[in-house]
Image (cartoon, rainbow, N blue to C red):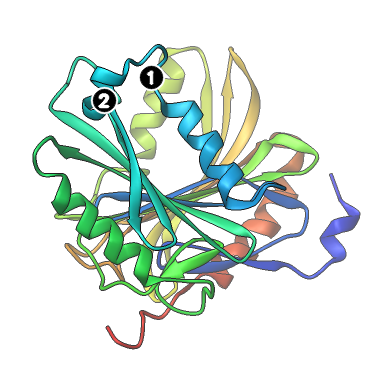
């Protein structure tokens, strides 16, 4: 499957501490990122601007039929600081001591949304953390921790995760996923045992053929690359490439990394070409100069 968009130059995407080149034939189908336990996302503002965005957000999370008497405990909207809105709400009635804070602000044509849970009575600790992160936001992705349209110039954390999913415009089964997580000990098990996967596939009446299994450096980190073709009775045959870096403990610049590319068997040659270019393009986003 060859797409005319493949002739266009790739664009740069970044998530967490890394950036890479993405072919124009792929779109971002999902992404998430968190730092210091705070989940962060960005999205285009609707025609009504940030006020319309925030009103819609509050409507989605406000418990139905909430009385004025119980509102203070289960739903409390307020200004976190000038230009930033926030709301505390009870997400799970089965855990009444755990509340969730959402806070947002506008930058350019985008909304920045942050979310973190906290214990009732200790709301100020979470509010202070989220306030600091909002103040660390910059529209540029040249440095720091990328969160979509922009980045955080925050100090590196031992609690960082990121994920971006890329899907081919003409095939939902043709995908690349890039994920990272700061670890406390190296992850030596994920995407590391082909023999175990073979046994699982064969037990279900399928088979796995190994095309690649080698050590390969990406962005200066030595990881394990595996390429397999998979045939199982319940699904169409597909090819999968993985690259896994075990991670350096508590090092946000060298987190555990998983890169996974999958495609139907007929698109194996195209996936392999895109895969090799993608791995070669991965680079670390420099930390903020003040850190």
- Location of residue 261 in the rendering, given as x and y in whole percent from the top left corner: 57, 46
Residue extending farthest to the left is 121
Q: Quick check: 136 above or below 213?
A: below
Quickly name the residue at label 2: 74
Quickly name the residue at label 1: 63
Count neighbours of disc 1 (C-alpha within 10 A) and say few if under 14, some if 14 to 19, many if 20 or more.
Answer: some
Viewer-proximal residue, 171 or 88?
Answer: 88
Q: Quick check: 84 above or below 1?
A: below
- Location of residue 287 in the rendering, given as x and y in whole percent from the top left corner: 36, 79
Q: How many marks?
A: 2
Residue in the picture at 65% in, 26% down: 237
| Numbered label attached to residue 95 | none
- Location of residue 19 in the rendering, given as x and y in whole percent from the top left corner: 52, 68
Disc 2 secondary structure class: helix
Residue in the picture at 12% in, 27% down: 97
Disc 1 secondary structure class: loop
Mark 1–mark 2 Cα distance, whole angstroms, equals 8 Å
Viewer-proximal residue, 72 or 62?
Answer: 72
Viewer-proximal residue, 43 or 56?
Answer: 56
Mark 1 touches mark 2? (CB < 8 Å): yes
Count neighbours of disc 2 (C-alpha within 10 A) and say few if under 14, some if 14 to 19, many if 20 or more.
Answer: many
Q: Determine which quarter of the picture holds residue 9.
A: bottom right
Disc nearer the start of the sequence (1/2): 1
Residue extending farthest to the front is 68
- Location of residue 229 in the rendering, given as x and y in whole percent from the top left corner: 58, 36
Q: Quadrant of the C terminus?
A: bottom left
Viewer-proximal residue, 218 or 61?
Answer: 61
Q: Quick check: 172 above or below 24?
A: above
Residue in the picture at 57% in, 67% down: 20
In the image, 212: left or right of 273?
A: left
In the image, 155: left or right of 242?
A: left
């Amino acid at each position: 499957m060859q797409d005319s968009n493949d002739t266009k130059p790739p664009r740069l995407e970044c998530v967490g501490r890394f950036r890479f080149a993405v072919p124009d034939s792929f779109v971002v189908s999902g992404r998430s990122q968190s730092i210091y336990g705070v989940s962060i996302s960005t999205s285009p503002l609707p025609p009504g601007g940030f006020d319309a965005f925030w009103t819609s957000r509050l409507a989605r999370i406000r418990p139905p039929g909430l009385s004025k008497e119980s509102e203070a405990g289960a739903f409390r909207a307020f200004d976190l600081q000038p230009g930033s809105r926030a709301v505390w709400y009870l997400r799970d009635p089965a855990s009444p001591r755990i509340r969730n804070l959402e806070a947002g602000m506008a930058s350019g044509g985008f909304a920045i949304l942050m979310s973190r849970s906290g214990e009732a009575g200790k709301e100020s600790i979470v509010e202070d953390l989220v306030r600091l992160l909002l103040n660390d936001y910059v529209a540029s992705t040249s440095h720091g921790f990328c969160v979509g349209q922009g980045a955080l110039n925050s100090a590196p954390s031992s609690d960082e995760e990121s994920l971006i999913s890329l899907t081919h415009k003409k095939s939902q089964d043709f995908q690349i996923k890039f994920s990272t997580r700061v670890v406390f000990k190296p992850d030596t098990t994920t995407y590391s045992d082909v023999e175990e996967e073979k046994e699982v596939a064969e037990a279900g009446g399928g088979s796995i053929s190994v095309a690649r299994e080698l050590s390969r450096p990406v962005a200066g980190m030595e990881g394990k690359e595996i390429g397999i073709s998979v045939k199982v009775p319940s699904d169409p045959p597909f090819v999968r490439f993985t690259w896994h870096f075990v991670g350096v403990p508590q090092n946000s610049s060298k987190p555990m990394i998983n890169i996974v590319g999958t495609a139907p068997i007929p698109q194996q040659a195209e996936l392999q070409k895109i895969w090799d270019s993608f791995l070669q393009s991965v680079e670390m986003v420099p930390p903020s100069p003040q850190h």
